[in-house]
Image (spheres, helix red, strand yellow):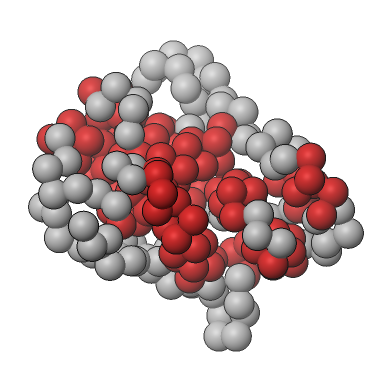
Amino acid sequence: MSGTRSAPPSAPLASASPGAGLAKLRAAPLATVRESGELSAAALALIAGCADAPAALEALEADGMATDAVKLVAHALPRREGVWWACMCARATMPADLPPADRAALDAAEAWVRKPSDENRRAAFAAAEQARFGTPEAWAGVAAFWSGDSMAPAGQPAVPPAPHLAGLAITGAVTLASVRADPTRQAARLARFLASGRDIASGGPGRMDPEAS
């Protein structure tokens, strides 16, 4: 895919009902998000009394805990939406000279979101492997792979990924995108990324304009 802004999935992600707000976060059991192992002790203490993931996100953002807020969104979004969010964050900071292997990994991850077949899932992992697992694009591909039923080779007995693995990969993609080339931009980038995540959680596409160099 070229460096232009990506199109939305041809098979739309399940949309939220009007006025539902962060419906796709609300559906995630907050206890499961807490058990992901990613949130800091301070974040866990802060959200201990929250009723659901949207309330926890509000608390984390209000307290300036953007890194933990990213982790919460990564684990609370449904897997297709989470992988799409990782792709949108990667695209937001993607350089014009992105290596072909990384571009292929991003394209493969987006292809899985549009059509979440096992073939596309495995293709996303193969592309991430070619990208050496070192970029936001590669980790978006890994997130797609870990969103499926098995990590075993095709045709072998299923080896299900642990439930938290896809969220870990999404967090990795978003975090790497936030520090790409210029880590001093991380705070501003995370603010944009969280706004994108909120949009996706409300049924939107979560697109962001490419970052000005």
Q: Is residue 150 above or below residue 5?
A: above
Residue 141 seen from this side: no
- Report the residue that reaches farthest toward the front: 184
Indicate left or right for 5 with 145 as reference. Answer: left
| Vertical arrangement, residue 3 with respect to residue 7, above or below | above
Tell which of 110 and 192 is nearer to you.
192
Counting every numbered tag in the picture gives 0
Give the percent coordinates (x, y) of residue 9.
31, 61
The residue located at (49%, 68%) in the rendering is 195
- Where is residue 160 drawn, in percent x and y? 56, 25
Can you tell which quarter of the image residue 32 is in? Answer: top right
Quarter of the figure with the C terminus: bottom left
Return the x and y of residue 13 as percentages of the image width and height: 43, 63
**Viewer-proximal residue among 167 and 49:** 49
Q: Which residue sits at x=12%, y=43%?
A: 97
Q: Quadrant of residue 182?
A: top left
Quarter of the figure with residue 39: top right
